[in-house]
């Protein structure tokens, strides 16, 4: 079981996120990820640091930890630009990158509209997702597909290294893992468990065949305490 966290990138300054990445690297956590939003969902007045430059900076401050997007939507940049950016990130990091990509949905449509970018119909977005995943994997970049729909799960199984279900039910993740032995892995992302029992939560996910758990803490988090607790739980379940 690999364990990661999403860095605090809904901020004006990058320093906290960079320091958390370094602390996570030193503590034994397996991955640090970044949301890829122009602003937080339903909060256009709040800031958001750009994911790929942030992850490149994290890569330079760390030595072994995986770094990744969770997720980069295929509608925000032209396909060749997004692929080139993620391939470059993989090179900068010494091939530690995980390219989490997705189609976007009704919750993120407002970001496209706010900046005058098209939000294509679902069929077009799914086609872009397939083409982006295939291109990234041809370049040797580990690629996850994020989303909960049946279509997205099928694309992940056929054209990616992993499927990420944000706050996904354990039974769906277990079914995906069982259906794809030796293929795309099941990965979970979501908020920390309400009771704070990381070890128990990780144990349940590991028993379901989940390969990664990535926690996205709320902004008002004691980050040093969270990293220490998460690192301890990760060690206990390995």
Image: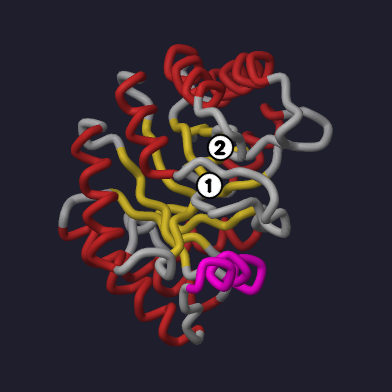
Residue count near mark 2 (Cα–Cα under 10 Å), binned few <14, some 14–19, many ≥20 = many
Q: Based on the displayed image, in which of its 4 quarters is residue 232 positioned?
A: top right
Assess whether mark 1 and mark 2 are in contact (beta carbons under 8 angstroms): yes
Q: Based on the displayed image, in which of its 4 quarters is residue 124 positioned?
A: bottom left
Q: Front-most of 119 and 165? A: 119
Compared to residue 206, the image places residue 138 above or below, namely below
Compared to residue 173, the image places residue 218 above or below, namely above
Compared to residue 14, the image places residue 79 above or below, namely below
Residue 118 shown left or right of residue 202 in the figure: left
Please give the residue where the numbered disc 2 appears in the rendered image. 9
| SS at circle 2 | loop
Residue 39 shown left or right of residue 194 in the figure: left
The percent position of residue 93, horizontal first and vertical second, equals 26, 32
Residue 182 shown left or right of residue 198 in the figure: left
| SS at circle 1 | loop
The percent position of residue 79, horizontal first and vertical second, equals 28, 68
Residue shown at the point (41%, 35%) measured from the top left: 54
Q: Front-most of 99 and 185? A: 99
- Whichever of labels 2 and 1 marks the residue nearer the N terminus, that label is 2
Residue extent of the magenta highlight: 105-116
Q: Specify whether residue 233 is painted magenta.
A: no
Q: How many numbered circles are shown?
A: 2
């Amino acid at each position: 079981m690999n364990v990661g966290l999403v860095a605090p990138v809904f901020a004006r300054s990058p320093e906290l996120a960079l320091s958390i990445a370094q602390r996570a690297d030193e503590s034994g956590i397996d991955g640090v990820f970044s949301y890829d939003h122009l602003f937080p969902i339903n909060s256009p007045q709040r800031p958001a640091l750009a994911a790929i430059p942030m992850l490149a900076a994290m890569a330079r401050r760390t030595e072994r930890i995986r770094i990744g997007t969770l997720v980069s939507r295929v509608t925000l940049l032209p396909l060749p630009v997004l692929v080139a950016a993620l391939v470059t990130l993989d090179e900068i990091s010494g091939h530690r990158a995980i390219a989490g990509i997705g189609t976007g949905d009704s919750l993120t449509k407002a970001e496209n509209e706010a900046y005058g970018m098209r939000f294509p119909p679902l069929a077009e977005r799914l086609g872009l997702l397939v083409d982006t995943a295939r291109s990234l994997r041809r370049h040797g970049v580990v690629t996850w597909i994020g989303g909960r729909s049946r279509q997205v799960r099928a694309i992940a199984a056929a054209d990616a290294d992993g499927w990420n279900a944000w706050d996904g039910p354990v039974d769906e993740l277990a079914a995906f893992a069982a259906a794809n032995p030796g293929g795309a892995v099941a990965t979970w992302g979501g908020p920390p468990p309400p009771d704070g029992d990381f070890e128990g939560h990780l144990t349940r996910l590991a028993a379901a065949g989940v390969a990664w758990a990535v926690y996205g803490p709320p902004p008002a988090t004691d980050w040093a305490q969270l990293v220490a607790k998460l690192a301890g739980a990760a060690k206990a379940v390995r």
